Image: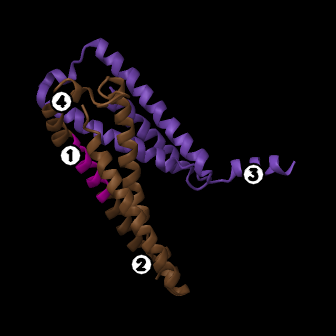
Chain colours: A purple, B brown
Amino acid sequence: MTLLITAAAAVISTIIWYSTIQKKDMKLGTLCLMYWGASLMWLIDSIVEYVELGADFFAPESADMINDAFLGISVVIFGLIIWLVILLIKDPSGIIKNVLFKKNAK
Amino acid sequence: MACFLVPAAEAIVTTVATQVIKSKEKKEATGTSHSESIVEASHISLSKKMGWLNKMLWGGSALLAFEHVWHGEVTPFFPFLTAVSDGNTMEMLKEMSINGVLMAVIVTAVWGGMVAVSEVKAKQLSKESK
């Protein structure tokens, strides 16, 4: 479930990156690569688990599924927070710089 | 258990390598002529390509570390890994050597694919411009 949610976040962020790359540099590429990196790592985790459990891997307990879904959503939000911090620090469009400069000018 | 430590270790190495490559590229850029710099603009620098790998490795490791904290496998106090404090160090090392190494390999392999595609695209662009 965590893999599915993170992979969905990776696909959605990549589509948004592709459709907005010409307009603004929002560092969306960083977010995409972060989610893709995590998805690939969880894919390996899932493959290893599948090798150990066999078909049981596809029939998890409902409580485990809910916990994994909750974890998946939390991971996506954690990724968004990391991206937001990078965006605010790097400030590619100079928005924060402009705001601070205006405040200082007053 | 601690599989994310393997790609995180790779991320440290690749980040240092990227910084070294970047400084070399800066030195080379100051010595190139205007016509050479126009040719250079059509291809993506190695440091930028390394940046893609760094982002995948650091991002993936950070999100996996979050998962390990969630499951109580990483703690904020020494020795930081519950597998070590519970005496399951060998099991943890086995997991790191299988899952962790495979994670680092797959991310690096996908990055290799991205680099190969970007090289092909760059060659196509330079052919079109000629």
Q: Residues within 10 Å of mark 3 (few under 14, many from 20)?
A: few
Locate the N terminus of chain A and report the quarter of the image it occupies: top left
CA separation in Å, label 2 and label 3: 41 Å
Residue depicted at x 87% and y 47%: A106
Question: Mark 3 highlights which residue?
Answer: A98
Which label is found at residue B101? Answer: 1
SS label for mark 3: helix
Residue depicted at x 12% and y 28%: A52
Name the spot of residue B89 as percent of width and height, x first: 17, 32
CA separation in Å, label 3 and label 1: 45 Å
Name the spot of residue A104 as percent of width and height, x first: 81, 49
Question: Mark 2 highlights which residue?
Answer: B127
User: Which of label 2 and label 4 is nearer to you?
Assistant: 4
Magenta residues span B100-112
Which amino acid does the dot numbered 4 rest on? Glu
Name the spot of residue A9 as percent of width and height, x first: 43, 36
Residue depicted at x 42% and y 40%: A10
Query: Which quadrant would residue B121 be assigned to in this image?
Result: bottom left
Say if labels 3 and 1 share a chain. Answer: no
SS label for mark 2: helix
Q: Is residue A23 left or right of residue B35?
A: right
Question: Mark 4 highlights which residue?
Answer: A49
